[in-house]
Image (tube, rainbow, N blue to C red):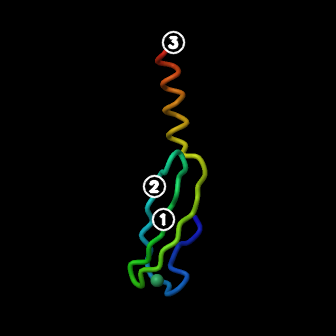
């Protein structure tokens, strides 16, 4: 995790995880000052798993 608190004001962060076209992004939003940033987590693991499941079902 890149941040545990807001680097600007030290306030509490809302951390959300999103996936866009197979890439996982972690979003940080400060509830105190509105600062936000995002961190790329690379390829989404769940999508790799779902691809494997589909291959197994075809057999
Ligand atoms: Zn802040």
Could you tell me if the residues under marks 2 and 1 are in contact, i.e. CB atoms within 8 Å? Answer: yes
Q: Which mark is residue 18?
A: 2
In the rendered image, the residue lying farthest to the bottom is: 9
**Quadrant location of the N terminus in the rendered image:** bottom right
User: How many numbered marks are there?
Assistant: 3
Residue 21 image offset from top left, x and y in percent: 51, 46
Query: What residue does disc 3 label?
Result: 59
Q: Earlier in the sequence, mark 3 or mark 1?
A: 1
Is label 2 within 8 A of ligand 1 (CB to nearest ligand atom)?
Answer: no
Q: Residues within 10 Å of mark 3 (few under 14, many from 20)?
A: few
Q: Earlier in the sequence, mark 3 or mark 2?
A: 2
Residue 13 image offset from top left, x and y in percent: 44, 74
Q: Is residue 41 above or below residue 56?
A: below
Q: Quadrant of residue 2?
A: bottom right
Q: Residues within 10 Å of mark 2 (few under 14, many from 20)?
A: some
Query: Helix or strand or loop: what does disc 1 sit on?
Result: strand
Position of 44 compared to 15: left or right? right
Residue 5 image offset from top left, x and y in percent: 51, 77
Q: Earlier in the sequence, mark 2 or mark 1?
A: 2
- The Cα–Cα distance between marks 3 and 2, rounded to whole angstroms, is 32 Å
Query: What residue does disc 1 label?
Result: 27
- The Cα–Cα distance between marks 2 and 1, rounded to whole angstroms, is 7 Å
């Amino acid at each position: 995790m890149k941040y545990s608190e807001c680097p600007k004001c030290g306030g509490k962060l809302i951390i959300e995880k999103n996936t866009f076209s197979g890439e996982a992004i972690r979003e940080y939003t400060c509830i105190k000052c509105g600062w936000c940033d995002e961190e790329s987590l690379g390829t989404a693991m769940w999508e790799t798993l779902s691809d494997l499941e589909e291959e197994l079902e075809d057999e």
